[in-house]
Amino acid sequence: MKGQVDRWGEREVRPGERKRLRIEAGTSFSGATMTLPLMVWRSKQPGPVVGITAAVHGDEINGTGAVRNLVQNPPFTLERGALIMVPVVNVMGFERHSRYMPDRRDLNRCFPGYSGGSLSSRYARVFFDEVIRRCDFIIDLHTAAVRRTNFPNVRTDCDNAECERLARAFGCEVIVNGKGPEGSLRREAVEAGCPTIVLEAGEVWKAEPSVQDLILRGVSNVLAELGMTDQTVESPPHQVIVEETHWVRSESGGFLQFHAAPGDMVDEGQALATNTSLLGTEIEIIRSPHRGIVLGMTTMPAASPGDPVAHIALPSTKRQYQTLEKSIGDLGEDSIEIQLREHLATNITITCQEDES
Ligand SMILES: [Zn+2]
């Protein structure tokens, strides 16, 4: 099964062909057959099979937009191997603009699935058998959950050398090391022998331009790294693997004024947000307890006690932090890295804290 992309049920995909296919993945409540669209692109030469999957969470559609761009205007010529591009894995969630399956389960905790199990488990099984098992490598595209945004970061198990190779090649500034939760596509795919990386970037319900650009560059990089194109890998100006991340929470109910944006470097004690009453009285200043890079933020200014405000990635050494800080300071205005920092902060009001110099 692994590497096999020529036959899809009755359909055949020959070397050099690009075909739009639909696989049957279950039945809707009204009894209609649910089908899952995908494109198989075979080059003329043999080589690895790379799966690009999006919207395993049905509302996380940044990757869906990027897959459409890849299908319409691929920024590379595929010389070896094959691509399986899946714009929406969780079709049932996507139909309702929802993260979840109709049985309220998280599909990304149901892999590899079971053909005698729940609706989600059966769906996961079909997808795992029909798509994942054919792939040699997978890039799984996600965004932050609702009311949050993520500064683009790749998550993978760096104990697996091939996973780390893929993560480095993709070219995000931050790689978060970890296996992922049980039942997640990435963890179960790696266990089934398919090195997999996850991209976490941007927000739900959006196809954000700079995130699309980043995904196109990242996919091109991975294919170049695997020898599937004749391009070269465009390395990012810096890259850090982090082992630890930390959510900073509000202590009181209030209305947040933000002082940091996704991708910013923050020092220990630096103000991330001021929590005020609705009429502007200061309640608390929320500070970062760590030195690190802002990996995720809430986009919801109304906060209650315990609400997550900012997700900080902690570089393991002070030296790593300083190198990263300097490198970010040297970024060119038109680099994707700067574009991302500007775009992701557009719906958050960032104001400097008054008592800070
Ligand atoms: Zn997700």
Image (spheres, rainbow, N blue to C red):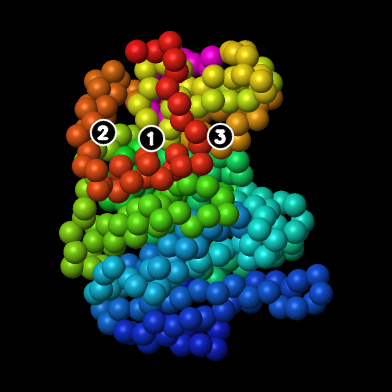
Left or right side of 328 for 119:
right
- The residue nearer to you, when weighing 31 against 131, is 31
Q: Mark 1 falls on what kind of element?
A: loop
Does residue 225 appear anywhere in the picture? yes
Q: Magenta region, mostly helix, strand or loop?
A: strand
What residue lies at 19% left-to-right and 34% top-to-bottom?
330
Q: Which segment did they paint magenta?
A: 285-295
Looking at the image, tell me whether mark 1 or mark 2 is earlier in sequence order: 1
Residues tagged 1 and 2 counted as in contact (Cβ below 8 A): yes
C-alpha gap between disc 1 and disc 2: 9 Å
The amino acid type found where label 2 is placed reads Ile
Q: Mark 2 falls on what kind of element?
A: helix
Looking at the image, tell me whether mark 3 or mark 2 is earlier in sequence order: 3
Q: Position of residue 44 (x, y in %)?
A: 27, 82
Left or right side of 60 for 45:
left
The amino acid type found where label 3 is placed reads Thr
